Amino acid sequence: MSKLIEMTEKYPQTELWTDSFHVEDHEYGLTQGSKGVTTSPTWVSKMMTNEALEENAQIIRRLHEEDPDLNEIELAWRWTLERGKERSRVMLPLFEKGAPKQGRFSIQTSIYEYNSYPKMLQMTREVDACGINMQVKIPCTEGGIKAIEEATYEGISCMGTQCFSVDQALAAAQAVERAFARREKEGLSNAGINPMIALLPGMQDETLKSHCDRLKLVVHPDALNWGGIAVAKKTINILKDRNYRIRPLIAYYRSYLHWSQFIGADCAQSIPVKWQRRIENCDIEIRDYFNDPIEEWKIDELMKLPLFHQVYEEGSLKAEDFVKLEPVVNTFRYFTSEYQKAVNMIRDICLPEFK
């Protein structure tokens, strides 16, 4: 039996999702029991530049002809919506079984608009209009938190993403609770809304290591592999203990620990297929690792890092600080550099060739 299937059979509260925009990955994930799909700006770029190139070019040309005033970034967004509308259908059978928390297909708002509440809110509405099972990823910046609240009030299922700190997660959770309270006051049901928060331990670890190197600090190397896990575990427990109705999702895998340490948690795990294939037949025992406490010496070592204090200690950050948080900045830079490959390709498609 696949280790992923064994995980969800033993711990049904720990759901498998698939992180990809590729059809074949979605199909493979379903064989492992995947209940949802996440995508990101990097997946958009990979799909645009590596898959069905002529088909993608034809779509871009058609969109450009329909609206010549659109620039490359706007065309990339229109293309993403069109592809998302088409590919989200793969998860519809799960969604239509009557479980609104399953069968979801997520698309993130534009990587360029992370500071603009009005633009993110408009994009959220556009993603939601692509299908009844859409889940909209919104970065946990100050403007993003506002967009999560208003969109949730409108009945849209949002996933706060680029969440690296306890304070960001709490801000998103509280935004959802305010939106739910407004809806309940107006007699509206929240049953069909699926609020989520994406925690990224792999990116967290990468940033903590670079932070340590930059400050020339001496920290035990084993501890540096547990920073993202420590923040995510603490966040999940706080959300549960305070009865927030936002569900955690783990993403951005850089070691098997980013999977195994969350077995047993009430969360989703959105795992790329390359990691699903590695995990499927591995020799890791399937048991509840989530409730294993992280050794105190590792936390003590991590506390040598100023950045770890920021992300681990509640009350360390204000909303205006979220966009300046080191792992948030690193993610924006990485996503933008990858996404720009798709933008450049669209420019080449739209401009004439000379022979």
Image (spheres, helix red, strand yellow):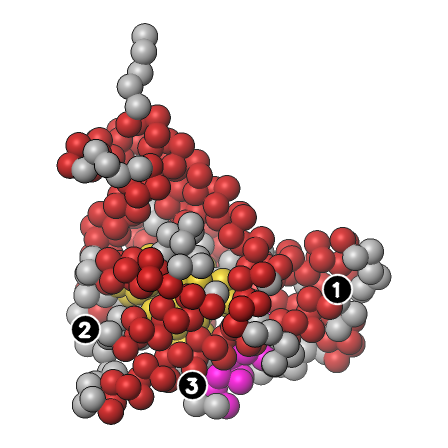
Q: Quadrant of the N terminus?
A: bottom left
Q: Earlier in the sequence, mark 2 or mark 3?
A: 2
Q: Nearer the viewer, residue 177 or 238?
A: 177
Q: Secondary structure at mark 1?
A: helix
**Quarter of image, res 301:** bottom right
Judged left or right of residue 314, residue 349 is: left
Q: Residue at x 43, y 90 (%)?
A: 243
Graded by Cα atoms within 10 Å as few (under 14), some (14 to 19) or many (20 or more), the crowding at tag 1 reads few
Residue that label 3 marks: 244
Q: Please, what is the dominant secondary structure of the magenta stretch?
A: helix
Q: Residue at x 47, y 68 (%)?
A: 142
Q: Earlier in the sequence, mark 3 or mark 1?
A: 1
Q: Position of residue 275 (x, y in %)?
A: 49, 54
Q: Amino acid at mark 3?
A: Tyr
Part of the protein shown in magenta: 229-241
Let me know if residue 174 is in the magenta part. no
Q: CA distance from mark 2 to mark 3?
A: 25 Å
Q: Earlier in the sequence, mark 2 or mark 1?
A: 2
Q: Quadrant of the C terminus?
A: top left
Residue that label 2 marks: 97
Residue that label 1 marks: 222
Graded by Cα atoms within 10 Å as few (under 14), some (14 to 19) or many (20 or more), the crowding at tag 3 reads some
